[in-house]
Image (cartoon, rainbow, N blue to C red):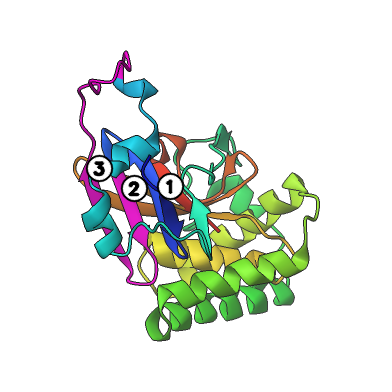
């Protein structure tokens, strides 16, 4: 029997549209392999019964050479152990809400304090600086460690909704075009300043290839619509 395969540190994998897609965070690079659709000759009745280990084993050597798989379990993760929660709805109950601007009655009735504005500016500046001056792996590591230090605090969805509303109202005051990576990190940084730590989700689609990210709390999206996010398969949660 062949040795078991593992994912090296900072390598993530998801299966979507007949492909295995890898995110190598250290290299800031996505790669994909095509999985065979025919069942093997050893008696498996359908491709669905083929384990992910078996699907990858046919391309084992080039994937190991590329640093996307390893046979050494030290400082590595078993393949298939990183399930990521899906989502059911948007935090505001609508499907077209991105964290960019807020109009109408919600904006008119919203109370924003000096502290809100200060925290928004600091979070926006920090996200912009980090994406410009730091490797994405370092930024993700810092967010992950900060969240781990905070522990498993209970989630107050009303507070999450309030903070998301404040961020959306203030977002046009920071002169930067909408970009999912920046806006998601800025929202994460803003919430962290209030002791709230949602999930930062990275996701992909295979055909045509595309990468996206968003923020969610439990099973509620904060800065992306359900229809668009549903076109992607999560590959990493921070």
Mark 2, residue position: 204
Residue 206, numbered circle: 3
> Measuring 76% from the left and 66% from the top, which residue is drawn there?
150
Image x and y of residue 22, in percent: 33, 53
> Measuring 53% from the left and 81% from the top, which residue is drawn there?
126
Q: Establish if 185 lies above or below 30.
A: below
- Front residue (pair 192, 74): 74
Mark 1, residue position: 4
Image x and y of residue 34, in percent: 20, 40
Q: Establish if 117 lies above or below 74.
A: below
Query: Visible in this render: residue 109?
Result: yes
**Foreground tag (3 vs 1):** 1
- Residue reaching furthest bottom? 133
Q: Establish if 158 lies above or below 141.
A: above
- Quadrant in which the C terminus appears: bottom right
Q: Does residue 76 appear left or right of residue 109 in this picture? A: left
Cα separation, mark 3 vs mark 2, equals: 7 Å
- Front residue (pair 156, 4): 4
Image x and y of residue 147, in percent: 68, 65
Quarter-wise, where is residue 195 in the image?
bottom right
């Amino acid at each position: 029997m062949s040795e078991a395969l593992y994912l090296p540190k900072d390598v993530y994998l998801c299966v979507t549209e007949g492909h295995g897609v890898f995110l190598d965070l250290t290299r800031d690079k996505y790669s994909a392999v095509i999985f065979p659709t025919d069942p093997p000759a050893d008696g498996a009745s359908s491709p669905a019964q083929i384990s992910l280990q078996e699907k990858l084993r046919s391309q084992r050597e080039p994937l190991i050479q590329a640093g996307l798989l390893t046979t050494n379990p030290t400082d590595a993760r078993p393949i298939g152990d990183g399930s990521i929660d899906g989502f059911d709805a948007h935090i505001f109950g609508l499907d077209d809400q991105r964290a960019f601007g807020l109009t109408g009655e919600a904006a008119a009735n919203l109370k924003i304090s000096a502290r809100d504005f200060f925290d928004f500016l600091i979070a926006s500046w920090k996200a912009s600086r980090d994406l410009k001056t730091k490797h994405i792996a370092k930024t993700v590591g810092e967010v992950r460690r900060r969240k781990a230090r905070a522990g498993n605090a209970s989630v107050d969805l009303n507070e999450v909704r309030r903070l998301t509303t404040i961020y959306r109202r203030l977002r046009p005051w920071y002169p930067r075009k909408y970009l999912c990576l920046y806006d998601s990190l800025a929202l994460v940084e803003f919430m962290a300043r209030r002791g709230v730590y949602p999930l930062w989700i990275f996701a992909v689609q295979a055909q045509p290839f595309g990468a996206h990210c968003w923020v969610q709390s439990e099973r509620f999206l904060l800065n992306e619509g359900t229809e668009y996010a549903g076109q992607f398969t999560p590959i990493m949660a921070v």
